[in-house]
Amino acid sequence: MPKRKDPERPAEAGDQDEEQQGSSKKRKQTKKPISKEAKKPDQVVEATDIVRVEKERADNEDDQTRPDVEDDEQAQADAAEMERRRQDEDNQREKMKSILATFTPSQMDRYECYRRSALQRGSVKKLMHSIASTTINLPMAIIMAGVAKLYVGELVETGLIVKEERNEAGPLRPEHIREAYRRVQSQGKLPSRTKSKPKLFR
């Protein structure tokens, strides 16, 4: 007997073909179109590089202009400070000239001797070390020698005033220096010693 053909099989095959064609159409529809930017990546990179270079150039120009302005302001401030110092020095020089013009010959001689005189730094350093019991460097000794020179000059000048008030001749004597020290201390030109308070417990 000859085999009968199944009429449903061709229909199923046809349905499968239609389904495959429909799925392929959907895939084509769902595919996104390629953008122009994706097609041309080199142009995008070049554009970003140009923007970055322009930004860096603008930043460099700003950085170059700002220091110039700050330098000009600093230069003006320095010039004003130098001018003020020069004026102060001129004023001090004029005051010193007016004071020296009133000196007598003996006072001028004493002033010249005072300018040329100086205390020995080694002696001042030893004295400071004996009092403070610490190491004394050279700058500290120089400063203390200058202060001590001012102190000695004040005592000598006041001692000469005391000698003239007493109508005494000759060099300065110890009583003149003691009286000069008392007067200088009473005028508040010397640091006063604070009396130590008695301790409650020893």
Image (spheres, rainbow, N blue to C red):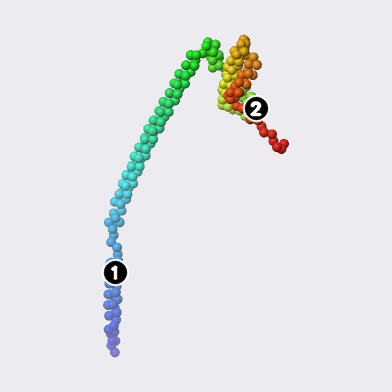
The residue closer to the viewer here, 128 or 97, is 97
Relative to 7, 76 lies left or right = right
Q: Give residue 79's position: percent from left, percent from top.
A: 40, 28
Q: Residue at x 44, y 25 (%)?
A: 85
Q: Residue at x 28, y 86 (%)?
A: 4
Q: Residue furthest bottom?
A: 1
Relative to 23, 187 lies left or right = right
Q: Quadrant of residue 191?
A: top right
Q: Give residue 107's position: percent from left, percent from top.
A: 54, 13
Callout 1, which amino acid?
A: Lys
Q: Which residue is mark 1?
A: 26
User: Considering the image in quadrants, where does the C terminus appear?
Assistant: top right
Nearer the observer, disc 2 or disc 1?
A: 2
Q: Which residue is mark 2?
A: 131
Q: Residue at x 29, y 73 (%)?
A: 20
Asked if the residue at tag 1 contacts the one at tag 2, i.e. Cβ–Cβ closer than 8 Å, the answer is no
